[in-house]
Image (cartoon, rainbow, N blue to C red):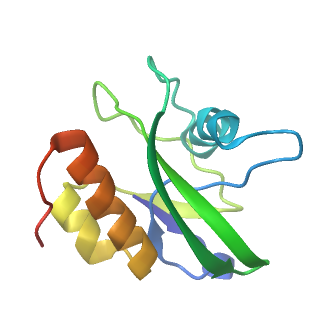
């Protein structure tokens, strides 16, 4: 989980990002985790097919969820212009930290897809 900085609202969120001009969701899902954490992943992102619409600070937006795995728990390289803290947490703990219902629903749906069972709080 990444904690946004004071100017962005100081809330916990998963790695998120914006699709740039000329880029698709998959390309953004490959680029954004590297930019947000500095991690180099060994496998490609798994497109969960989970999408939702929401209103961002820039207006209406659509988010699509991808899943990535890490072999260990490395320390991310945070950009202080975006994030001030991070923590590795179990999925149930993440449910408690997430601020937005769409992120909570997205985590539950992704967990069900990846692990084949429900994530209960």
Percent position (x, y) of residue 43?
A: 44, 19
Residue 27 position by quadrant: top right
The residue sitting at 65% across, 52% down in the picture is 79
Q: Residue most toward the right?
A: 21
- Residue 99 visible to an observer of this rendering: no
Q: Residue at x 42, y 69 (%)?
A: 103
Above or below residue 113? Residue 118 is below
Task: Inspect this view and state whether residue 116 appears.
Answer: yes
What residue is shown at x 30% (from left), y 59% (from top)?
109
> How many numbered tags mark residues here?
0
Q: Quadrant of residue 69?
A: top left
| Left or right for 58, reference 62 | right
Query: In this view of the protein, which residue sits in the foreground, 16 or 84?
Result: 16
The C terminus - image quarter: bottom left
**Residue 92, x across and y down, in percent:** 16, 64
User: Which residue of the protein is positioned furthest toward the top in this rendering?
Assistant: 42
Q: Residue at x 65, y 58 (%)?
A: 80
Q: Point out residue 50 in the picture as x, y percentages from the top left corner.
A: 45, 56
Q: Taking 90 as reference, is 70 above or below it?
A: above
Q: In which image quadrant can residue 75 be found?
A: top left
User: Is residue 52 placed above or below 54 in the rendered structure?
Assistant: above
Quadrant that contains the N terminus: bottom left
For this rendering, which residue is in front, 61 or 33? 61
């Amino acid at each position: 989980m990444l904690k946004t900085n004071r100017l962005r609202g100081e809330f916990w969120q998963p790695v998120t990002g914006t699709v740039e001009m000329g880029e698709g969701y998959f390309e953004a899902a490959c680029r954004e985790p590297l930019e947000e954490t500095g991690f180099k992943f060994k496998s490609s992102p798994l497109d969960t097919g989970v999408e939702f619409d929401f209103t961002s600070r820039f207006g209406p937006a659509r988010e699509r969820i991808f899943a990535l795995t890490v072999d260990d728990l490395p320390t991310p390289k945070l950009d202080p212009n975006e994030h001030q803290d991070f923590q590795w947490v179990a999925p149930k703990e993440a449910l408690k930290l997430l601020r937005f219902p769409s992120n909570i629903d997205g985590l539950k749906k992704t967990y069900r897809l990846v692990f084949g069972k429900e994530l209960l709080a």
